[in-house]
Amino acid sequence: MPIKINYKKCCWKDGKCSSCSCGGACIGCVEACPVGALKRERKVIFDSKKCIDCGACVEACKHDAISLSN
Ligand code: SF4
Ligand code: SF4
């Protein structure tokens, strides 16, 4: 069951945080992932081969931008 990132909701845009509500530095999904499946580049990218479907990133995202999909 891979995750799905809603890039409209995700505050990480063009390599920087675009949000005021999280203090200008989104600490969330990337830090929460125990296997390094998420990275911040120009946008948040996801490596489905590494993902173990733990759901930690879904819980960590303050912007409700990640969901588990099936
Ligand atoms: S579901 Fe778990 S393993 Fe997969 S990207 Fe999210 S935090 Fe990482
Ligand atoms: S925690 Fe949510 S808002 Fe922040 S970078 Fe990850 S997906 Fe985007």
Image: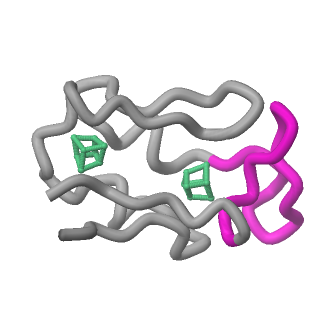
The quarter of the picture where the N terminus appears is bottom left
Q: Is residue 9 rendered to the left or right of residue 70?
A: right
Q: Where on the picture, by quarter, is residue 9?
A: bottom right
Q: Is residue 62 rendered to the left or right of residue 46?
A: right
Q: Is residue 6 above or below residue 3?
A: below
Q: Is residue 58 rendered to the left or right of residue 50?
A: right
Q: Residue at x 82, y 31 (%)?
A: 15
Residue 17 drawn in magenta: yes
Q: Where on the picture, by quarter, is residue 4?
A: bottom left
The quarter of the picture where the C terminus appears is bottom left
Q: Is residue 23 rendered to the left or right of residue 4?
A: right
Q: Where on the picture, by quarter, is residue 10?
A: bottom right
Q: Residue 47 at x, y = what percent? A: 35, 29
Q: Residue at x 31, y 38 (%)?
A: 33
- Circle count: 0
For the rendered model, the colour scheme is one colour
Instruction: Check the image and name the residue furthest to the bottom.
Output: 64
Q: Residue 46 at x, y = what percent? A: 43, 36
Please state which of residues 17 and 21 is positioned toward the viewer in this rendering. 17
Q: Residue 60 at x, y = what percent? A: 41, 60
Q: Quadrant of ligand 1?
A: top left
Residue 38 drawn in magenta: no
Q: Is residue 25 above or below residue 61?
A: above
Q: Residue at x 44, y 65 (%)?
A: 66
Q: Is residue 50 above or below residue 51?
A: above
Which secondary structure class fits the magenta region best?
loop
Q: Residue at x 70, y 38 (%)?
A: 43
Q: Is residue 6 above or below residue 40?
A: below
Bounds of the magenta segment: 9-26
